[in-house]
Structure formats: C-alpha cells, structure tokens
C-alpha cells in the first residue's frame, strides 16, 4: 500500500483520532478518581503549587507571593483549614502542632 494513498491517509487519521480520544478519557478518568478520593474536609480543584499560594499548611506563614498561573489538580483543604503534615489531615489552625 502506497503511503500517499487515500486509504493509508484515512487509516493514519483514524489512529490519531483514536489515540487522542484515549488520552482525553484517561485524563478525565484520572481526575474523577482523584475527585472521589477527596475527604469531606477537602475540595477538588486546581490551585497554584507556588509556596505560600494555594493551600494553607501548618507551620508555614501565609505571605503575599506572586503565584504561578500553573496549577496542581488535586484535593485541597477547604476554606481556612490547614494541612497537618503528620497525618495529612485538614485542621483548624489551633490543631496545628506548635
């Protein structure tokens, strides 16, 4: 089969379309699995991974930073809760270790 025949070109295009659909489905299914793994005190979303931006963490002072426009998809502490390192739970600030 010649590489410039219409059938060959159609087959190549079909393969590309199938690959793109598979990649998109894997991406969506991956996000769905992450979303289902979020605890009740967490919310699923996309926040800046820059230190001092995004999620509050116990022992880290909040400081104004220039936050990256890129984001990390995952489960993040809701509202004013802080991520505690020892058990990875979201807790009010008074439950953070000193």
Image: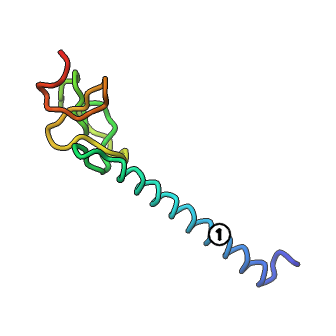
Q: Report which residue position mark 1 lands on.
A: 16
Left or right, residue 25 beside residue 52: right
Which residue occupies the foreground of this view, 5 or 78? 78
Q: Quadrant of residue 22?
A: bottom right
Indicate the colouring scheme.
rainbow
| Crowding near the residue tagged with mark 1, few <14, some 14–19, many ≥20 C-alpha atoms within 10 Å | few
In what quadrant of the picture does the C terminus appear? top left
Where 69 sits versus 6, above or below? Answer: above
Report the residue that reaches farthest toward the right: 1
- Residue located 51% across and 64% down the image: 25
Residue at 68% from the left image edge and 71% from the top image edge: 15
Dividing the image into 4 quarters, which one contains the N terminus?
A: bottom right
Residue 34 rendering spot, x and y as whole percentages:
39, 50
Q: 11 left or right of 32?
A: right
- Indicate left or right for 70 with 14 as reference: left
Hey, which quadrant is residue 11 in on the image?
A: bottom right
Residue 52 seen in render: yes
- The one nearer the camera, 83 or 23, is 83
Residue 31 in the image: state x and y as whole percent.
41, 55
Residue lying furthest left in this view? Answer: 94
* Res. 70 visible in picture: no
* Residue located 26% across and 48% down the image: 43
The quadrant where residue 20 appears: bottom right
Residue occupying the point 13% across, 28% down? 93
Q: Is residue 91 above or below residue 20?
A: above
Give coordinates of residue 29: x percent, y percent: 46, 59
**Element type at marker 1?**
helix
Residue 46, position as x, y percentages in the image: 32, 49
């Amino acid at each position: 089969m010649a590489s410039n025949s219409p059938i060959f070109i159609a087959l190549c295009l079909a393969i590309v379309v199938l690959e793109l659909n598979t990649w998109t489905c894997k991406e969506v299914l991956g996000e769905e699995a992450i979303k289902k793994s979020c605890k009740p005190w967490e919310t699923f979303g996309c926040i800046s991974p820059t230190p001092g931006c995004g999620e509050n963490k116990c022992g880290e002072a909040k400081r104004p930073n220039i936050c990256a426009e890129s984001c990390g998809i995952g489960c993040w502490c809701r509202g004013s809760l802080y991520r505690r390192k020892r058990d990875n739970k979201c807790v009010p600030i008074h439950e953070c270790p000193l």
